[in-house]
Image (cartoon, rainbow, N blue to C red):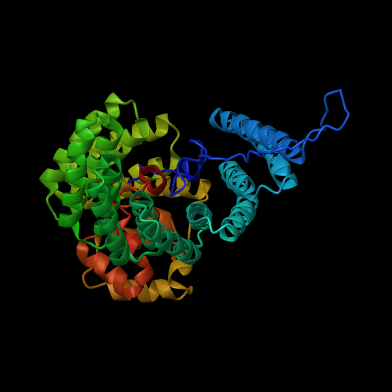
Amino acid sequence: MSNVAYRGERRWAIGNRQGAALTTHCLLPIAYCLFFVVLVMCPLPLTFSPSTAAQTIAPEMEAKRLVEQGIQQYQANQLNAAIASWQQGLALYRKVQYRHGEGIVLLRLAKAYYALGEDKQAIAYFQQGLRVAQALKDLANQRTALAGLGEVYYFQGDYGKAISLQQQGLAIARKLNDRQSEGLALRNLGIAYDAQGNYAKAVEYHRQSLTIARQLHDRQSESTALRNLGMAYYFLGKYSEAISAYEQDLAFTRQTNDRSGEGWLLGNIAVAYYYLGDYAKTISYQQQRLAIVRELDDAQSEGVALGGLGIAYYYLGDYAKAIDYHQQSLTVAQRIKDHQSEGAALANLGNVYFSLGDYPKAIGFYQKSLEIERQSQHLQSVSTILGTWEEPTRFWERLRKPLSITGRVWQLLVKSAIIKPKELPWEIWERLTIPSATIVKQLNTLNNGWQSRARLAIVQVRPRRWMI
């Protein structure tokens, strides 16, 4: 069930991409000159040409003006104009060899290019800024540059490099006794390990981040740490611990009247109770979420909540209500032209009718779902996941005892010639009614890489960008 946040929101250690720029503290040197003048038979006052110091101050003042101008442009989302101003300021700082100002502007330029999605340029400027900070032994800006580089590499999918850079930044933050930056670095490390699938390590770092947030009485960072911790516990299969983390954050979210965040938490708590087999609580939390997303006029989340209710009622054996909620979910998906959710609703309706023994109607829904998936180009063959074309046969043999509802569905589809065995699309698989705990374990035995995919069949896609 998805509550997806995309790259456009990219917030990590260096903050919101469209947020406030780096703070500068430029100290302008002041030259004091003491002149001892001996007048020898000179009745007229002496005149002096401008000193070298005065000539130096003028470019620095202009550079500072350009930097401030760039900050205002950046905050107004005029990124290209901000870059132009900072490039001029950078040239002036280099002209007078003011390295501290140069280093700060380099980091500003890196952030602006990153906000534009020009990662190659962003990396180049972060690296230049890092070299200047190292030359000046400026630990604070070294930490900023390392965090920025770590974020870029994270969003490029190079989690190993991101972790290495964040570890370096963490060491500097601790050396500076900068607790806030330490907490951010710990958070980022937790998120990077989470992206790698190393959830145990992610839990370790999120717990440390949570401890620091509480020591600093930083409620917002505490909320973020609890959400991250809840997600890591969830993917470890520790559903009770995940619920505990979410419930703690839910109390804070309600205090601050964050309705969107409240809805997200309610949905994830519902998913965790589903895996604990407590369908009554799953329904209760999904109903609460549904009320909130309707209040917020969030149609996509409304469709997700309706689908979640349909799945819960399906497992309670109340097929009439399951059909009702899946039909509502389908209507919403079609109204907002969300083809993936439309395919999911159709597949889930197929499951219900399959369980009712109405195979012709089930096949009809599966066929419609498959057509949408093919049109949307979300079709992936099992060979992508298991490696060879021969694997599907072995796959079914391994699942035959016991055979899941999903396995029987695929057999029906293959026998009805709706789908060829080699296609077996993953995007359809993960949108079918959720496999039982037994089938998930069997999937994990077949291939460790299936673990998170099998669980994602019901959970909302983790909104890393949204919650960071």
Instruction: Point out the residue furthest to the right here.
Output: 41
Quarter-wise, where is residue 427 in the image? bottom left
**Residue 14 shows up from this direction:** yes
Q: Is residue 271 left or right of residue 91?
A: left
| Residue 62 or residue 47, whichever sits in front | 47
**Horizontal relation, residue 303 to residue 94: left or right:** left
Q: In which quarter of the image is residue 52?
A: top right
Front one among 406 and 133? 133
Q: Residue 220 at x, y = what percent?
A: 29, 40
In the rendered image, residue 304, in percent from the top left (x then y), is placed at: 31, 40
Q: How many marks?
A: 0
Residue shown at 74% from the left, 38% from the top: 36
**What x and y, as percent, mark residue 402?**
21, 70
Q: Residue furthest front?
A: 41
Is residue 389 shown above or below 65? below
Horizontal and vertical percent for residue 230?
Answer: 25, 52
Left or right: residue 138 versus residue 227 is right
Q: Is residue 133 above or below residue 253?
A: below
